[in-house]
Image (cartoon, rainbow, N blue to C red):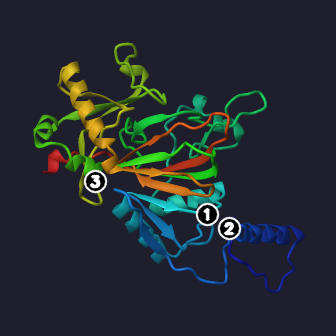
Amino acid sequence: MSCENRFSFGRKTSNAALYNRRRKNDRCKKFGINKRKAMSLEIRKIDAPLGAEVIGINLCNPISEDDKKTLYQAWLDNICLVFRNQNLTKDEQINVASIFGKVGERATPKKRRNEDKHGYDGTIMMVSNDRDKAGNYTGSLPDGEMWWHHDMSYRPEPHKATFLHGLEIPSHGGETQLSNMYLAYEQIPSKLKTKIINKKVLQAYDFALRGRVNLSEKGLENIQHQWQPICILHPETKRTALYVSRLISASIEGLEPTESFEILEQLYEISENRSVVYEHSWQKGDLLMWDNRCSIHARKTFPSEQRRVLRRCTVEGGPMISADAVA
């Protein structure tokens, strides 16, 4: 659906078409949108180590080619973008995501996708603690805290962008935290940097919210995993970013377990420090998007008795490029 007025000349308009038009107009009025007045696009930086709010755009309207270019560059420059007061359908959210590339398929095995039972395809994840009449979750990642992670870093070609649309928000908690991994890399002490030069890290995930995979208990053949560079070169900005996370990074190539653990803990502390973090407090209608190549994200806990429903989609990426290989 779109919030743009449409006119029919030379033919009668059906009752169904009139009804749909009124619904679209009502959606625009609900969010205070004046369709006759053009709004100028503004990128307003957030007072944080990353992030910008996009002002003056209604994403359920067609977006001009110039505005698409502005949004894409703002995303590269600011890592994450916030759009307030949006009211997107599933298809409209997919259309917005497609500005940034080809919309991706989820890595979660089909048998674990609760959403597929409720009419969604593999492009959509409902981050939701909603339950059906039988008491079963209708979505994924339902309750509680979720540790810091990159999306799909355990795949050969991780998705480059994630889009979350807030549909139902609890009264408090459930904030999404994002970390600027460019800054995290810059804050690594030189002595520590020498220990991770040309090293790879094992990214392994078993779809838990908290706690890394126990490699002594689970064989890698049963877990989605991929060796990735610890430090990557962003293919578009050409900047270096740290590429580890507490939830998914399991071990460093060529190091004894104790040394690997100690180094990773130091890198986690740097990447989770408040000096490199933006914390997003959700409002209904927010669309939050970020660059997975140069950020990690986490979720804070929230009251489990309150509904929290967000719609997620992603955009395909490519192989991670080692920053050391091109240094």
Dot 1 falls on a residue whose secondary structure is loop
The label number, if any, that marks residue 234 in the structure image: 3
Q: Quadrant of residue 224?
A: top left
Crowd tier of the residue under label 1, counting other residues whose Cα lies within 10 Å: few below 14, some 14–19, many 20 or above: some
In x, y percent, where is residue 155?
39, 37
Screen quadrant of the N terminus: bottom right
Query: Mark 1: which amino acid?
Result: Asn
Dot 2 falls on a residue whose secondary structure is loop
Q: Which mark sits nearer the N-terminus, 1 or 2? A: 2
Above or below for 146 versus 41 = above
The residue wearing badge 1 is 85
Residue for point 21% across, 30% down: 263
In x, y percent, where is residue 193?
14, 40
The label number, if any, that marks residue 245 in the structure image: none
Above or below for 212 versus 81 = above
Q: Which mark sits nearer the N-terminus, 3 or 2? A: 2
* Residue 168 left/right relative to 226: right
In x, y percent, where is residue 295?
36, 48
Q: Distance between the residues labelled 1 and 3?
A: 31 Å
The label number, if any, that marks residue 31 in the structure image: 2
Query: Mark 2: which amino acid?
Result: Phe
Crowd tier of the residue under label 2, counting other residues whose Cα lies within 10 Å: few below 14, some 14–19, many 20 or above: some
Crowd tier of the residue under label 3, counting other residues whose Cα lies within 10 Å: few below 14, some 14–19, many 20 or above: some
* Residue 210 left/right relative to 272: right
Residue for point 74% across, 68% down: 24
Q: Which of marks 1 and 3 is in front?
A: 1
Above or below for 217 versus 296 = above
Q: Nearer the viewer, mark 3 or mark 2?
A: 2
Dot 3 falls on a residue whose secondary structure is loop
Query: Mark 3: which amino acid?
Result: His
Q: Can residue 228 be seen in this view?
A: no
